[in-house]
Image (tube, helix red, strand yellow):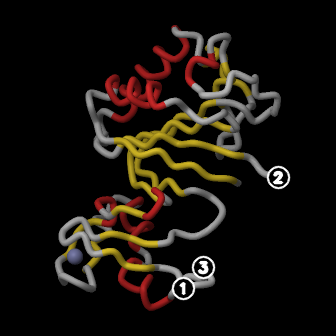
Amino acid sequence: MGDYFQTIVDLDATEQDAAPLGAALLDWLIADGIVDAERTDCVLDADGYGNAPGPRYAEAVDDPEPVDLWSNGLHITTGRTVFDSGQGEAGAATCPLCATEIRLVDDTWCPIDSAWAPLAGRFGDWEKGGEGAVECPSCHRSSGIDRWSWEDDYYACGRLGLTFWNWAELTHGFEQEVRRRLGGHRTVTLRGKL
Ligand SMILES: [Zn+2]
């Protein structure tokens, strides 16, 4: 068992627009009845408070069964955050400049230390406001770790994330509407377990 989550991460939101965009999305989700207006103890994020499913929650997911777990809310995170998929490992990272994919695990899905070396510590650096510069082992050019992409969207660096705890799979249409309301920003959806 475990708690399943989906996080829609906005890859383009800036430090300035993350909070207002998050607030506008929450207003829309409450107005449409997707989540309740009241913030309650219903998520597993650090502060423990989120918005439980609302009366029209089923319109956002592909399975209308209600979520009967206590951890069933929406948590909105703002500010520089490295989102991850919880259990497991990232399989590969891809350079944004030359598109070379670096395998990060071996055949038994164990992390390869030498492959991780150029990336080590960069997430922490970026989260603290640094560049998180990674020198690509293939093209030898440097780019921020927030621009790298990850197999199965295992990681995503962003300043705005919507985490839905134990909801059935979000529909394609719902994710599209979220993107539209984010002004057409690029998003990725992480799916994982804790
Ligand atoms: Zn490269």
Residue 137 % position (x, y): 27, 85
Callout 3: SS: loop
Spatial CA distance of label 2 from label 3 is 21 Å
Quarter of the image for the C terminus: give it. bottom right
Confirm if mark 1 falls within 8 A of ligand 1: no
Ligand 1 position by quadrant: bottom left
Residues tagged 2 and 3 counted as in contact (Cβ below 8 A): no
Picture layout, residue 113 above or below residue 159: below
Q: Earlier in the sequence, mark 1 or mark 2?
A: 2
Spatial CA distance of label 1 from label 2 is 26 Å
Residue 60 % position (x, y): 56, 23
103 vs 122, nearest the viewer: 103
Can you tell which quarter of the image residue 85 is in? bottom right
Spatial CA distance of label 3 from label 1 is 5 Å
Picture layout, residue 44 above or below residue 128: above
Residues tagged 3 and 1 counted as in contact (Cβ below 8 A): yes
Amino acid under disc 3: Trp
Residue in the image at 45% along x and 56% along y: 153
Residue 36 % position (x, y): 64, 15
Callout 2: SS: loop
Q: Is residue 129 left or right of residue 43?
A: left
Q: Earlier in the sequence, mark 2 or mark 3?
A: 2
Q: Identify residue for label 2.
A: 1
Q: How many marks?
A: 3
Amino acid under disc 1: Asp
Q: Identify residue for label 3.
A: 109
Can you tell which quarter of the image residue 127 is in? bottom left
Q: Identify residue for label 1.
A: 106
Residue furthest to the bottom in view is 114
